[in-house]
Structure formats: C-alpha cells, structure tokens
Image (cartoon, rainbow, N blue to C red):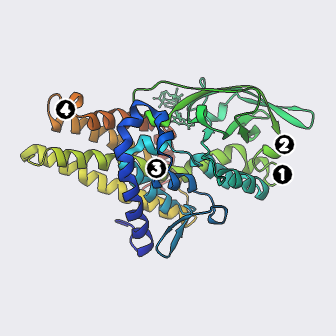
Amino acid sequence: MTEPTGERIAALRSYVREAGRELRAIGLEIDRDPEAIDRWLGLPAVDIMRGCTIPAEYLDSPLRVGAYTYDMSSCLEHTVTIEELSYGDTGSMLACPGPLMSGVAVSALGDDKQRHHYYERMAGPEPVWTFFGLTEPAKGSAATELETTLVPEGDGFRLTGEKRYVGNAAYARLGVVFCRRAPGPLGIEAVLVDTQAPGFHAEPIPTVGMRGARISAIRLDGVRVEREHILGYDSLKPSRRGLIGAIRTLQRFRPVLAGTIVGLCRAVLDHVREQRPALAGGARARLEDLEDRLTAVRRQNYEVAAAIDAGRVRADRVAGVKTRAAELAERCTLAAADLMGPGALLEDPLLNKLYRDARAFEFMEGTGHIQRLAVFQGVLKRTFLN
Ligand SMILES: Cc1cc2nc3c(=O)[nH]c(=O)nc-3n(C[C@H](O)[C@H](O)[C@H](O)COP(=O)(O)OP(=O)(O)OC[C@H]3O[C@@H](n4cnc5c(N)ncnc54)[C@H](O)[C@@H]3O)c2cc1C
C-alpha cells in the first residue's frame, strides 16, 4: 500500500488537513502555555479529537465529510486523522479533550453498560479530558510488575498507588487506571476512575518538549472503585481483561502513535524545504534520503493499520513500525538542525519546537528497547519478515 486510496479516505484526509493547519497556528502558544488550549476549544480539530472512537449515534454532530461519516473505529482512518492533525501540531493535538487511549481501552474491554456510560459522558456538551494510566515511577517499562493495588472493601474496592508521565491526567475528569487485584499477570485490572473522587491527586510534570501532552504524576490514596467500574469484570474472564486489555489497547493505538510521529516528520522535512529551497548537492541528497525513508515508514504504517482493521494484529510489526518511526523522528530533527545551518535552532521557533517535541517519541507507548524485544520475538518465530 502506498497512500491509502479511495474517495472515503481522501475526503477524510483533506478535511482533517485543513483542521490541522489551525493547530499549526496555535502550536507555539500551546508550547509556551499548554493550558491555552482552553481558548481554542471551538476549533474543528478539537471537535475531531473529541469525537474520535465515540460511536456516531452518541454525538450531536459526528464527523461528516460529504456523504461519509467517521467514528475512527477503523485503525487506518484513525491513523490518517491523527497523522494530519500532528502534521499541524502534535502538542496542540495532544492537549485536546477527548477519549484518546482511554477510549480504545474502554471499547476493547468494557461491557455494553460501561461503554454506554463512558460514551454518554464523553459526548456531553462540556469538553472532557481523559487519561490512560499505566506507567509507574518504579516500573515504567515493566508494566506487568505494576504495583498500584485494588483491594476489596465492602461491596467495592480501594485503589492505592502512583502513576507517572500520564498525559493530561492533571486536567482530566475521567481516566483508565491499570492496577493489581491479585499477584501475577492475570491479577491486573483496568478501572475507570473519576478524578473528582476523594483520594485522587494529579499534578503536571514540567517538560522541555511535547508540552501539550501535559504529562502528569498521579497519586491514588484509597480511591473508592465500584465493581461496575472494573472494565469487563462481569463480561470477560481474568485472562481476557486487565493486562491483555493494556496490550490490545497499545497494539491498536501504536499505528496511531506512529501516524503522530509520521505527521511530525513530514512537518520537519517540509519546513526545511520551505526555508531552504536552494539546498544543493550533498545537503539536497540528505533531505531526499530522509523523504524516501519517511515514505517507506508511512507506507508500512498504513499496512499495519489496515491489517489491524482486517483482524490481523501482528505484535512484531506493530512494534517495528513504531520503532522505525521514532528513530526517523530523531534523524529528521537532527538533520534539519544541520541543514538549516548555524543558529537555526535558536532563531527558528518552529524548528526549535519540533526538535524538542520529537524526543518524546522514544518513550511514548514503550521505548525502542521494548519494541525491539517484540520485533526479536517475530524474528525468532520467523514471522517478522514474512
Ligand atoms: C510525552 C509522553 C507521554 C506519555 N504518556 C503516557 C500516558 O498517557 N500513560 C502512561 O501510562 N504512560 C505515558 N508515558 C510514559 C511512557 O509510556 C514511559 O516513559 C515508557 O513506558 C518508559 O518508561 P520509563 O520512562 O519509566 O523508562 P524505564 O522503563 O525506566 O526505561 C529506562 C531505560 O531502560 C530501558 N529498559 C527498560 N526495560 C528494559 C528491558 N527489559 N530491556 C532493555 N532495556 C530496557 C528503556 O529502553 C530505557 O532506555 C508517556 C511518556 C511521554 C514521554
């Protein structure tokens, strides 16, 4: 697959690209002050983010372009959408209200009642920020060893522990927290948490780049959790919920993240072309080489996303494309600083921002080392290259 073709996806891409332009216009403002997103909640891009993965029947005005309606239940359409918004500005896109990863988790794990409750809250008139709380201070990549506990109390539970680097948590009204009800991987659960509940505390963590993601530290001091807030508790076996839910969510979301990275890489390379139209010789060849690599990663990402839509989730390929995209973002931003010449990182605010933002991708949804372990499993099983 090169670019996915067909009227439906072309119409979506062109609509979202326009909406992304407006994010570019506010990108530097959001970088200086991520809370400034509150002034821009009327932008079409915000509406798109608010509706992503919410079924159209819940929304007053679902995303419609011409004869088509989109709810982002398709991984490929979701990926194309996020790529175009990220081309506009990744940080502003991540600062928007909406379901983001929590929506994918609820749709993968929740029973009908839980999904209905979540979609109704997300579709209300007020914007709702959400979070997906997996990472812990002492157990970042070792997610299966997470220590946040869910202890029975009366007819419900108490949630206690800490989460770190969780996007938007300090601003969210609702989120999914992964926690431990019993020892071992099957003892992990995913619970829906209302941030107004007593015992929930979150504060933003200052960062150098990707400031729009507003990563936060969470402290959970015995937050009360009702049984009906444990995702899939009454509908799924323990072996199909908590941990498997985290893995399914991350795998479904990884092409979307890779699309985010591709969007930023396109923004970087287009910016170099616009600012340095006379690049020649080795410098021009270097830029073209990066553009070729970007085309390849983008194509591979569309293939992975389309395979997920077709029910073929390949952990090794999903991991491979995220790693390649994150590596390319490093390479593109380093090369851009070089190609734009001495002083460019100080004098060109957009380049400066893209350079700082790109560093986040190595960590988001699993570091390169962790992704390479998944790729290596595929190499051992001889599935990765076949
Ligand atoms: C912008 C941003 C947004 C984020 N949003 C969220 C979010 O919304 N929700 C959430 O839960 N988390 C989020 N994260 C956290 C992210 O998922 C973690 O940073 C990531 O999983 C790594 O965990 P860690 O930072 O604790 O690093 P560590 O796990 O401590 O890793 C440190 C280093 O050790 C290496 N390493 C660790 N284990 C192994 C191993 N087994 N083999 C080889 N090398 C290893 C890593 O590759 C890395 O280089 C976000 C992070 C960023 C930067």
Front residue of 174 and 282: 174
Which one is closest to the eye, mark 1 or mark 2?
A: 2
Closer to the eye: label 3 or 1 = 1
To which residue does mark 3 refer? 379
Q: Is residue 154 above or below residue 106?
A: above
292 relative to 138 in the view: left or right: left
The amino acid sitting under disc 1 is Asp
Alpha carbon separation for disc pair 1 and 4? 57 Å
Q: Looking at the picture, which amino acid does disc 2 mark?
A: Arg
The secondary structure type at the circle numbered 2 is helix
- Give left or right: position of 191 versus 132: right
The disc, 1 or 4, on the residue closer to the chain's N-terminal end is 1
User: Would you name the residue on which mark 4 appears?
Assistant: 344
| Disc 1 and disc 2 in contact, CB within 8 angstroms | yes
Spatial CA span between label 3 and label 1: 38 Å
Q: Residues within 10 Å of mark 3 (few under 14, many from 20)?
A: some
Q: Amino acid at mark 3?
A: Val
Q: Residue at x 49, y 76 (%)?
A: 67
Q: CA distance from mark 4 to mark 3?
A: 41 Å
- Spatial CA distance of label 1 from label 2 is 9 Å
Choose the circle earlier in sequence order: 2 or 4. 2
Q: Which residue is mark 2?
A: 227
- The residue pinned by badge 1 equals 234
Q: Earlier in the sequence, mark 3 or mark 1?
A: 1
Q: CA distance from mark 2 to mark 3?
A: 41 Å
Q: Secondary structure at mark 1?
A: loop
**Residue plotted at (67% across, 48% down):** 245
The label nearer to you, 2 versus 4, is: 4
Report whether residue 321 is seen. no
Residue 100: x %, y % from top left: 56, 48
